[in-house]
């Protein structure tokens, strides 16, 4: 192998043209076929199915799919207050969780970046929550939140602070879910921001130091503008993930108390698989899908394109 | 306009059409007396907006191409 | 970054804050592991007990009474099968995208948009479709139906392929084309070049993608929760079965959670170097 590759290319041009039984074009199409078949069949088929159901009457408690009803399901869902409330919960969760994660994550990245020793072990400990399933650790967080045996309230009690009913109180439950999400995903932001910080070129900062620029000025005019693409990517990835919040709600609160923590995904699940109104649930799925499609087209795709072209040039 | 650009613009136009339909059903339809009239008007508006977007993308692509060609021509003349 | 003269006080403050952050991050996991070794009578007490004689009672309970090994066996089978499918199909496609740029980027972005699908949006059709296929003879034979492993394998393969393709494209882009060119000129067929030159060079990247996929499958909850009841349930659903009429058995829950979380943590620590890259679809190569 390694011997044959050291032969100068000019001497061995002939055999290659002889053995080429297929054009590059067909070969490249052949290579993507298995993956494309899987994606087209198992992504587009269910989508078509959901779209079909969203135009029908489909109450599973009354048997099979029913007749076409035109746009009626869309009208009903758009007029459904519980649906809009779940959208509101999702937005509230997304905005607060993502904002907290970004601010804390970036702060932690700066903190670690300035550390002189032990970066390796700090990073190792930070990635641990990312390896865990929200369904498993989330369940255990219920034990931490427990009003009687929970560790959080025990510590609060030691400090003589109020001990809230984390998951049972109407005004607090959503914030408890946010806190869990912040625990799991702040390391994600910190890790990527840290990678961005460490990849910054040295020269401009040395020049700024020679000029005697203040720390704040360096941050504002150098660090953040250069970090912006990475931070924006993290922001978009986290936002897209948070909007799909399900696992944490399912194990921590099941949408309760009442419906105060019922996210859009959870409401969709309840409508489709607890109340068996597949038609309304499918309609919500179509709305959801549309929103995600628009988001990924206008926010994520240009971002990733920017990164991938830069990488292939560099 | 290349196929690639047409595909991109076409996809976005479809998304615009769907978006208009959703917004119409949620916000505008209640001001119409008859549902069928509303649906007709909705489709007209949605198609018009999607088409306008597509045509604008097309004219932009055409203009860009013309500009690029002019640039190349200028460079060629310079070289001669 | 800048090396400004730092005083001892700022350094102490910095490490103090870091320790605080790490305590917040590590503590829930640590407490979970600690709880799993507590004797049952020390779990449900107020105030919480920090000193106790460690026992394996909770593990025994989780494994014998709750049959937790059964869920682990299911999870292992389903995740490994899906991972193999994802890596094979993904590597072939990613190579094609990286080298031949099939579809001029449009197919690649279509694939990305399927990754953005909220799983919940396709789960209702999956539920309805698998409910039907599970009743047919072929479906039963292949295990494709509700509460059968095939349904989850299909779902996991579908939902991890886009991620795997994107990550693998970034790894293939790192391999210099010259090697392939010279191998081609030596008369190797395209397939041989792939097998003998490209894949060995991309092996670390392929392994990293595989491990990421395995972690995602292992930790997946939504599909497992909705598409399975008993016979094909995975660990994330299995832990839910610790809800009993007497309340949640926190000791065994902690034991089961520890068993299911530790292997994934080991994986993550092994590939720390690639974490950032994997988590950003290969965009940030930190």
Image (tube, coloured by chain):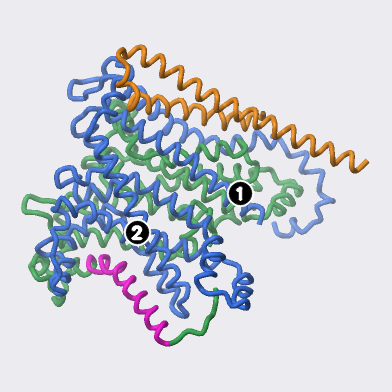
Q: Is residue C183 left or right of residue C279?
A: right
The circle on residue A100 is 2
Q: Does residue C12 belong to the magenta stretch?
A: yes
Residue C76 locus on image (x, y percent): 33, 51
Residue at the image point whose x is 59% and y is 25% from the top:
B55
Dot 1: element: helix
Q: Colour of chain A?
A: blue
The rendered magenta stretch, by its main secondary structure, is classed as helix
In the picture, the disc for residue C195 is: 1
Q: Is residue A16 above or below residue A57?
A: below
Near mark 1 (Cα within 10 A), the count class, few <14, some 14-19 or many ≥20, is: few
Q: Residues within 10 Å of mark 2 (few under 14, many from 20)?
A: some
Q: Quadrant of residue C204?
A: bottom right
Chain depicted in green: C
Question: Could you tell me which chain the residue with mark 1 belongs to?
Answer: C
Query: What is the magenta range?
Result: C8-32
């Amino acid at each position: 192998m390694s011997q044959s590759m050291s032969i100068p290319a000019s001497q061995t041009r002939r055999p290659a043209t002889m053995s080429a039984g297929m054009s590059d074009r067909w070969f490249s199409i052949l290579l993507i076929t298995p993956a494309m078949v899987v994606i087209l069949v198992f992504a587009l088929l269910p989508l078509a199915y959901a779209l079909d159901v969203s135009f029908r009457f489909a109450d599973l408690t009354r048997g099979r799919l029913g007749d076409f009803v035109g746009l009626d399901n869309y009208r009903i869902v758009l007029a459904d207050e519980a649906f809009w409330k779940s959208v509101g919960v999702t937005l509230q969760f997304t905005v607060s969780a993502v904002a907290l994660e970004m601010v804390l994550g970036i702060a932690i990245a700066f903190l670690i970046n300035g550390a002189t020793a032990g970066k390796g072990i700090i990073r190792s400990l930070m990635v641990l929550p990312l390896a865990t399933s929200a369904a498993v650790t989330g369940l255990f967080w219920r034990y931490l939140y427990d009003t009687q045996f929970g560790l959080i309230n025990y510590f609060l009690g030691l400090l003589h602070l109020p001990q809230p009913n984390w998951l049972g109180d109407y005004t607090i439950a959503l914030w408890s879910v946010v806190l869990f999400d912040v625990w799991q995903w702040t390391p994600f932001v910190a890790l990527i921001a840290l990678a961005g910080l460490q990849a910054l070129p040295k020269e401009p900062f040395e020049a700024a130091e020679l000029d005697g620029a203040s720390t704040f000025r360096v941050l504002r005019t150098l660090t953040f503008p250069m970090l912006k693409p990475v931070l924006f990517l993290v922001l978009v990835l986290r936002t897209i993930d948070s909007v799909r919040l399900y696992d944490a709600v399912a194990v921590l609160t099941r949408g309760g108390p009442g419906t105060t923590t019922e996210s859009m995904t959870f409401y969709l699940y309840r409508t489709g698989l607890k109340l068996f109104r597949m038609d309304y649930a499918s309609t919500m799925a179509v709305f959801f899908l549309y929103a995600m499609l628009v988001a990924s087209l206008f926010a994520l795709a240009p971002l990733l394109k920017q990164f991938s072209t830069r990488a292939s040039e560099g | 306009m290349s196929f690639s650009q047409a595909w991109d613009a076409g996809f976005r136009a479809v998304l615009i059409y769907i978006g208009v339909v959703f917004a119409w059903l949620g916000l505008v339809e209640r001001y119409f007396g008859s549902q069928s009239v509303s649906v007709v008007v909705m489709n007209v508006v949605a198609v018009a907006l999607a088409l306008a977007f597509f045509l604008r993308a097309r004219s932009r692509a055409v203009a860009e191409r013309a500009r690029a060609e002019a640039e190349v021509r200028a460079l060629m003349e310079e070289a001669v | 970054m800048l090396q400004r003269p730092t005083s001892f006080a700022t350094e102490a403050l910095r490490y103090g804050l870091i320790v605080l952050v790490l305590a917040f991050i590590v503590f829930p996991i640590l407490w979970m592991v600690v709880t799993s070794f507590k004797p049952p009578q020390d779990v449900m007490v107020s105030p919480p007990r920090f000193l106790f004689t460690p026992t394996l009672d909770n593990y025994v309970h989780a494994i014998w009474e709750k049959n937790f090994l059964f869920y682990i066996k299911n999870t292992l089978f389903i995740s490994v099968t899906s991972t193999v499918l994802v890596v094979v199909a993904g590597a072939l496609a990613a190579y094609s995208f990286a080298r031949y740029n099939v579809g001029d980027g449009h197919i690649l972005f279509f694939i990305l948009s399927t990754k953005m699908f909220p799983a919940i949006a396709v789960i209702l059709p999956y539920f309805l479709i698998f409910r039907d296929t599970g009743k047919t003879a072929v479906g039963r034979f292949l295990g494709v139906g509700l509460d059968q492993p095939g349904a989850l394998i299909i779902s996991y393969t579908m939902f991890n392929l886009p991620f795997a393709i994107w990550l693998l494209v970034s790894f293939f882009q790192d391999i210099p084309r010259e090697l392939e060119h010279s191998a081609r000129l030596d008369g190797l067929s395209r397939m041989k070049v792939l097998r003998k030159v490209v894949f060995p060079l991309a092996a670390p990247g392929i392994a990293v993608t595989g491990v990421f996929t395995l972690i995602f499958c292992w930790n997946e909850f939504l599909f497992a929760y909705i598409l399975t009841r008993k016979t094909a349930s995975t660990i994330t659903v299995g832990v839910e079965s610790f809800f009993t009429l007497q309340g949640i058995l926190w000791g065994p829950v902690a034991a089961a959670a520890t068993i299911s979380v530790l292997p994934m943590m080991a994986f993550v620590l092994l590939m720390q170097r690639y974490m950032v890259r994997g988590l950003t679809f290969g965009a940030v190569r930190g």
